Image (spheres, rainbow, N blue to C red):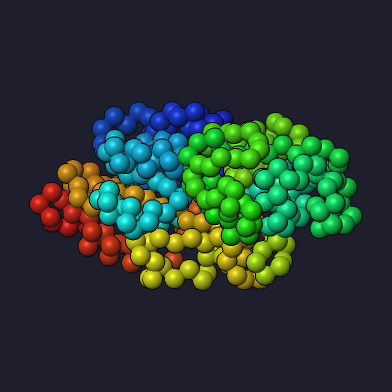
Amino acid sequence: MKRAKRTIKALLIAAAGVACCFGVPQAQAGTTITGAGATFPYPVYSKWAYSYNKDTGVRLNYQSIGSGGGIKQIKARTVDFGASDAPMKPEEMNKAGLMQFPMIMGGVVPVVNIHGIAAGQLKLSAANLADIYLGKITKWNDPRIAADNAGLKLPAEDITVVHRADGSGTTWIFTNYLTKVSSEWKEKVGNDKAVQWPVGLGGKGNEGVAAFVGKVDGAIGYVEYAYALQNKMASVLLKNRNGNFVAPTAGNFQAAAAGADWSHAEGYYMVLTDQPGANSWPITGASFILMYKQQARAVQAKEVLKFFDWSYRNGGKAAMELDYVPMPDAVVKMVEATWRHEIKDSAGKAIW
């Protein structure tokens, strides 16, 4: 499968909080749209922005700073749109005057750095993954892990837990899953973009977590799948709700997303973790775009919507090459109808 051409070096620059301007650097004229937030969709937004700039001359300045930062920036009106992997509840959106729509779906995957263990070799149950992050399982050769991995040589090595240090939608998806599969996690830690981690080291962004796991022997972390691919990391097999150990693949992300009924999701609030299905990847999620319903800069807002319309209609191939799941056509039609209904200029006229 064709892989993304962007290097981890470029991604680490984004994680440091530098505003990455995608497009042709010498193009001084033309429109620039601005956004900030989730690192989960950064690889595909990057590819879309490059192609869109070639087609239209419009540039995207997207800061990959985490979902928490993206929500703060859109609320502060310092960007044209925010991006979050943690869907906002309808009441929270209404209070802020915001609306959201899903842009892409994909998988969050546990990745490990264990000597002699390759991608797809280590099997983890939901309970064992939760107990590792609770600090209750501390060695890779723990009998509970060994019971699911007959024939696999597990070292008597300390487990180093790596998690996000910033407010993160990837963390929201990951902890949402752990809350569903572990009553102890639900009671002691819970589900949020930032939590009080019982153990571990914090990395900034998906990029920072990937970098930490790659450097620390015995480490385990969680990243969006594109980062695991780009960094050639060893992803694990997870036991899903149907009791099957499954690999993180685009097909298995699609299996988890297949049952999503967006037409009944108020404000597009949808959670895709721990879905039933023989092949469903259990830590699947969507990434969302946040915009104000009332736009003082109507022309700029329309440019943002044009970019996302182009991405829906032309970005599917690039998304699948990076193992994301494009939004179904029926959902795209619903979303664009929502744009017409909800996003208006200061005079109350529809922008789209």
The quarter holding residue 242 reads bottom right
Q: Nearer the viewer, residue 181 or 300?
A: 181
Looking at the rendered image, the quarter that the C terminus falls into is: bottom left
Q: Position of residue 321 (x, y in %)?
A: 55, 53
Q: Nearer the viewer, residue 137 or 204?
A: 137
- Residue at image coords 59%, 63%: 274
- Residue at image coords 79%, 37%: 158
Viewed as shown, does residue 126 lie left or right of 140? left
The image shows residue 253, relative to residue 22, as above or below, that is: below
Q: Is residue 39 visible?
A: no
The mark total stands at 0
Viewed as shown, does residue 33 lie left or right of 269? left
Viewed as shown, does residue 280 lie left or right of 100? right
- Residue at image coords 13%, 49%: 346
Q: Residue furthest front?
A: 187
The image shows residue 131, relative to residue 34, as above or below, that is: below
Q: Is residue 160 visible?
A: yes
Q: Nearer the viewer, residue 35 or 310?
A: 35
Q: Position of residue 41 (x, y in %)?
A: 48, 47
- Residue at image coords 27%, 65%: 337
Q: Nearer the viewer, residue 14 or 318?
A: 14
Q: Residue furthest left?
A: 347
Q: Position of residue 130 (x, y in %)?
A: 67, 51
